[in-house]
Amino acid sequence: MRQLKIGIVGTGAITGKHVDAIAEIENAELVALCSSSSERAKTAQKKFGIDSYSDLSAFLTHPELDVVCVCTASGHHMEAGLLAAKAGKHLLIEKPIEINLARADQLIEACEKNEVKLGVIFQNRFSADYLKLKAAVQAGKFGKLLMGNAHVNWYRAPEYYSNSPWKGTLEGDGGGAFMNQGIHTIDLLLDVMGDVKSVFAKVKTALHPIEGEDLGAALITFENRALGNITASTALYPGLPERLEIFGKNGSAVLEAGKLIQWSIQGEESEPILADTNPGSGAADPMAIGHALHRAQWEHFVNAILENKPVVVEGRIARKSVELIRAIYKSSELEKEVEFPFFDHS
């Protein structure tokens, strides 16, 4: 089986997780990096020892390039993604796919038109304990779903925002605690609970001097008539591990920081099911996670290309979390419940 050649656009902190993940995959090789700054490109070339560019067009002409991974600011995913798709490169994009639905849709359509695969990084979908929880729900072990909750009550020090030119900005981040931090657990919630019927929400900026929100709560009604609560924050010191709570007629499960800490089914012994490894939590430090789950998603994406199989977190699936978060923002703005499907292309 041939080896796919990969290039990464963006040289920020998350890029290191991708570099480490790709290095451990037998049928993939990192061959190029691209930064918007010539100085950062030179630094990256020295650090990683591979071809590094400060011009995206030149980067895309690299003779071996098969796959482009976009790790730029969230609100800049579309520009790099469109050029890569038009160049016939498969795309794996860091979450979110983009910061609004119009930009997300352009990416999805460009990849479909150019017949390249599109995946979005939601690495927590590949954790062993989450997969156990999802399988149990699909098998009906918890019975009819009644409620699903996602809580990302985190803390970020002031430097997290002041040292970044884009985090917390509407142009670069698309919002705040929901679009950047909360989206991972929101993605898991939607994957388990299904499509949303409506949302009523309130967000605010309570602590940090940023454009986006650092505190918010939402009440969800799902299409299956279950209810859900979502809270997200970067203002709640010292920051608690993220939680996914699933309740059904016959039992419930709680996933905290990637590990099952509660597992109760009527008629069965109530014991937590614990995986061998802990992916870590970004509750207080965004880099306090390993790269094992990134590696798992990269392995899946590479094999999907080589074997021409479907991508688990493809563009239209990744769009769902952006749709919900944009609806949360609109509900807070209008101070009323917002119905789905939601079409906010602003």
Image (cartoon, grey):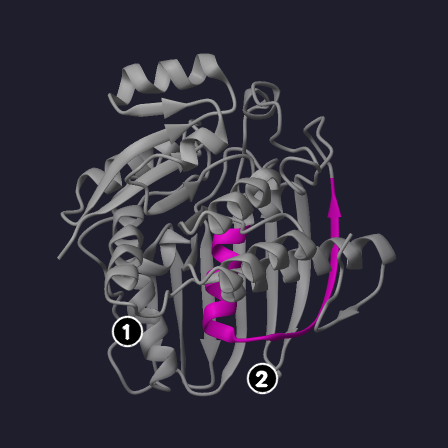
Which span is picked out in magenta? 183-204
* Residue corresponding to mark 2: 224
Residue 289: tell me if it is visible: no
Q: In terms of secondary structure, where does tag 2 sit? A: loop
Label whose residue precedes the other's in the sequence (2 or 1):
2
Using the image as rendered, state which of residue 219 and residue 66 is in the foreground: 66
Residue 211 at x, y percent in the picture: 74, 33
Q: Position of residue 339 (x, y in %)?
A: 76, 72
Q: Is residue 287 above or below residue 258?
A: above
Of residues 142 and 301, the one nearer the viewer is 301
Q: CA distance from mark 2 to mark 1?
A: 26 Å
Three-letter amino acid code of the residue under disc 2: Asn
Which mark is nearer the camera, 2 or 1?
2
Residue at point 42% right, 87% down?
143
Q: Is residue 219 left or right of residue 92?
A: right
Q: Where does label 1 land, which residue?
A: 270
Q: Residue 139 sits in which quadrant?
A: bottom left
In-image side of 227 versus 24 (left or right): right
> Could you tell me residue 290's position as x and y percent?
29, 39
Check disc 1 and report its element: helix, strand or loop: loop
Does 103 lie within the magenta span?
Answer: no
Eyeballing the image, is 232 above or below 146? above
Q: Residues within 10 Å of mark 1 (few under 14, many from 20)?
A: few
Quadrant the N terminus occupies: bottom left
Residue 284 in view here: yes
Residue 23, quarter of the rendered image: top left
Q: Which mark is residue 314?
A: none
Q: Residue at x 39, y 82 (%)?
A: 142
Q: Front-most of 289 and 7?
A: 7
Q: Name the kind of residue labelled 1 in the image.
A: Ser
Point 45% across, 55% down: residue: 243
Residue at image location 41% in from the left, 60% down from the top = 117
